[in-house]
Amino acid sequence: MKVDRRKFLGLGSAALVGLSLKGERAIAGSFVNESFQAGHLLRDRAGFPAPKRIEKVPVVIVGGGIAGLSAAWRMRKRGFTDFVLLEMNDAAGGNARWGENEITAYPWAAHYIPVPGPKTVYARELFEDLGVLKDGQWEERYLCFSPQEKLFLYGRWQEGIEPAVGLKPRDREQFQRLEDIFAKYRNSGEFTIPLEVGRSHRTADLDRVSFSDWLRRENFDSPLLHWYMNYACRDDYGAMATDTSAWAGIHYFSSREAEEKGPLTWPEGNGWITRRLLERVGDNIRINQMVHRVAIGPRGVTVEAGNTQFQAEFAIFAAPTFLAPYVVENFGPLHDFAYSPWLTANLSLDRLPDARGAEPSWDTVFLDSPTLGYVDATHQSVRSHIDKTVWTCYWALTGGDSKQNRRLRLEKDWAYWWEAILNDLERVHFDIRQCVSRIDIMRMGHAMVRPTPGSMFSAERQRLSSKKDRLLFANSDLSGISIFEEAQYQGVKAAEKVLERIAGRK
Amino acid sequence: MGILLFISVLLVAACGLIYELVAGTLASYLLGDSVLQFSTVIGTYLFAMGLGSAMSRYLNRGLVYRFIWIELLLGVIGGFSSALLMLAFAFTQGFELILYALVIVMGVLVGLEIPLLMRIVRDRYDFRDVIAHVLTFDYLGALAASLLFPILLVPRLGLVRSAMLFGLINVAVAVWSTFLFAKQLPTARSLRVTSVVVLCALSVGMAEAKKITATAEDNIYADEIIFARDSRYQHLVLTRFKDDLRLFLNSHLQFSSRDEYRYHEALIHPGLASVPVARRVLVLGGGDGLAVREVLKYPQIESITLVDLDPEMTRLFSTHAMLTQLNQKSLLSPKLHVTNADAFPWVDTSTESFDFIVIDFPDPTNYSLGKLYTTAFYRAVARHLSAQGVMVVQSTSPMFARDSFWCIAATLKQVGLHTYPYHVYVPSFGEWGFVLASSHEYTPPTSLPAGLRFLNVEGLPAMFQFPPDMAPLSIPPNQLNDQVLVRLYDQDWKDISH
């Protein structure tokens, strides 16, 4: 009898739940753009077949990220076309790759560039070339539309990511004092983009402590301020402030002086720049060509990829430098190159979820979220009516040991990550599950170089970037921070050196 | 048994409080003056509870049976109270009457609950314990409900579904009680059947709550609604009071048929009459065909292109008899080409040029609409102007939204156009403004089409004069990356309404 009663109630409540809740909708998706299987062949020193053919070409560029593409852009702009660029993936772009579906184009990694200041000469030159900067005016359509950023905290929205509500007088005082310190460093002219232009040993002490230790030493203890500083480090370096050099932390805030409300951004993020660069240098690119051996000889460099041995006079190694010990003969181990693992997810939305009264903005961040928030790919559309979009969620796996995080990233399946991402979004957009039709996830084990304490003034780095032999290094990791402007600067600089030496010999 | 019983008390108390809060909140929402509404609703409710308690002494037999019936009644009345009140406000004149009638009925029923329960269980426990336990759980339920209501229920479920959810809980208590007090019930079957019916009704209500709310909200307009439809893009409502036809888009008034001629004559003629030989005209927005009606007063016009986002809008204004009478079937003119498209991308991709361009968009109330008032947009539009071409922009009110008006003028100026701001009085809108812009000097026309009801040549120069309270302000231009206009507009209207 008792069982029957329970059954009756059970059935009743089940019927109720069934009537009041909508069925969970199926979400499609997968991991995409995986390249670690191929990359790990290098790490495991797998045997590669001996080359079957030889190709002679004056210059070989290894790696088709922004550094490699920029080197190629520079060479072609100078009228030099006799080179090949070898890209391991099926598309060039590196951290500026993009995707596209029936809704919109969207970024897979880097998605914006702060409006470059006057010292960022090469990037400004590129933007003049691409029609982004015309007669000193930045093209309005490429500047981030209003509203730019919003932060969800204490159950409400605020404009901008720097916390502005719920501040105690102590928080307020500390934000102001820190801004004054950043302004002082900004005015010192030592924190520049490219780094190399302004960096001097006068501020080298700042590289010996972590950013969080430095903040504490300067008597900053506001939890909101620490959250914001950590957010900045996670966002730009994929690291917590404890794992970031104080010099790099300060650089984030002291290197930029906006001359226009920005940043520069496009639906496909920095993929827009990749597209424009591919239009200019696409003919020189060979895709699916993973370089597995580079050897420097007395009269040239040999570069082996697949079944081809390229015999070149010069090579530019624009791939991440950590690969060099596995690829370049007699290279020796590296000590000062650490990398942050990342995860990005692209969510296709059939309709816009409830946003608790907020209008869609470009970048949305939740206070105390483990992720970095999401960017709306249709935000740069000039349309007035937008009912479908793609959100790109960024997640730097920062806490704890990078190796462990990398392993975690490979072990967990797709459903684990999308569930984690939806759980996070659901805290603010309660009906998100009813709006998402697809979630694709990209895992990057070594997404960006990590500016750990000591790495900004590393002798190893300086040795590699001032090398004068036939193999030049050009990845942004030589600068110590992984941003577009540094990658582009390193690539252009390497191209200039190569062109100079080729010209000098003729 | 004991704890189950007291949990019933807790649930019953929570339900009672929720209905009271729902009624109070709805009354404040809909009638305003929340202090008054809450005080009177709570007062009436408590008084009715007292009535219920007093009446409980007249119930002597079949206490359990009656208690369960009260739960079922409360489940239905309380559960649907919120929906009922919303619909009452939207469709009847007697909202307050229905409100207080409901409050009294619910109060009486709630007032009966606890005395009956106490009497039902008095034989099982010591009297002291009954009082202590029942009242403890009663107050605990009230606390839970009062916390859940603002934090979880209203934001997550809304008022309609919150009430229904608690209606379900009342019914659940009824069902539960048929088992709990089975020994004191002669027959439980009919009660259980009724419960299932009520349960189903409330569940359907939960699922359809959105429709109920929408139906109610649609109807909160001053006049009789003669047409209402949700298009993919907006909510269209047409109301009529005697000979006054009004169009609302997303609850914003677009025109009143009594004075729209003032608006549309002022929008079109100062610009179009000044173009020596205008042949091709572009109208952006203006799916009501009223601007087109004015343009058609120039026989030399060969073609008019109308770009409006919403096909529902252009369809309505080319088929509805009252509306085609108003726009004089302008949308059916053979000179007209209607394109239903988003204006900015259309302007970007079209290569046509026009002698007169009309930009008649809704006010910049949000960043999406704000894009249509930026330097980037005006630059793109200006490329379509012929050598003699002129454009005119609906620019909000220079009186009520003075900063916004001058911001739009500054934005047009920023793209290198000459600007000529002017204003007219439209009774249903108040003082309203427009900006003429062209790449050459503009002089007001010396002749106008025949048959205008508002404009005459003598009156034109005065429209370009701005008295001190509407005089120019120095405002930065509106740009895609810095939409100052949306913030100004929001601020301007806040300043007016507070």
Image (cartoon, rainbow, N blue to C red):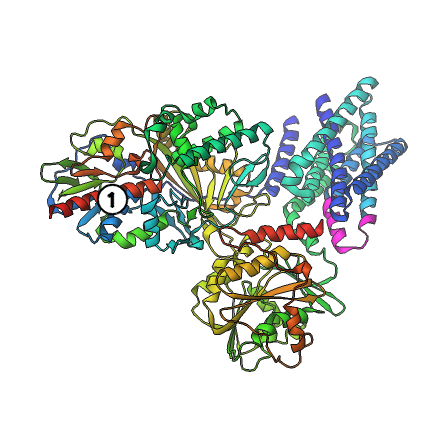
Structural crowding at the residue carrying mark 1, measured as other residues with C-alpha within 10 Å and reported as few (<14), some (14–19) or many (≥20): many
Q: Which residues are magenta?
A: B80-97
Q: Position of residue B85 (x, y in %)?
A: 75, 48
**In the rendered image, the vertical position of residue B186 relative to residue B245, given as above or below:** above
Q: Is residue B408 visible?
A: yes
Image quadrant containing the N terminus of chain A = top right
Q: Residue at x 69, y 66 (%)?
A: B425
Q: Is residue A235 visible?
A: no
Q: Which residue is mark 1?
A: A87
Q: Was residue B121 drawn as part of the magenta stretch in this picture?
A: no
Q: Position of residue B387 (x, y in %)?
A: 46, 74
Q: Which chain contains the residue that carries disc 1?
A: A
In the drawing, does residue A330 fall left or right of residue A125?
Answer: left
Q: Secondary structure at mark 1?
A: loop
Instruction: Specify the principal SS of the magenta part.
Output: helix
Q: Position of residue B61 (x, y in %)?
A: 86, 31
Q: Nearer the viewer, residue A107 or B175?
A: A107
Q: Residue at x 76, y 46 (%)?
A: B32
Q: Residue at x 53, y 59 (%)?
A: B411
Q: Position of residue A10 (x, y in %)?
A: 62, 33
In the drawing, does residue B32 fall left or right of residue B371?
Answer: right
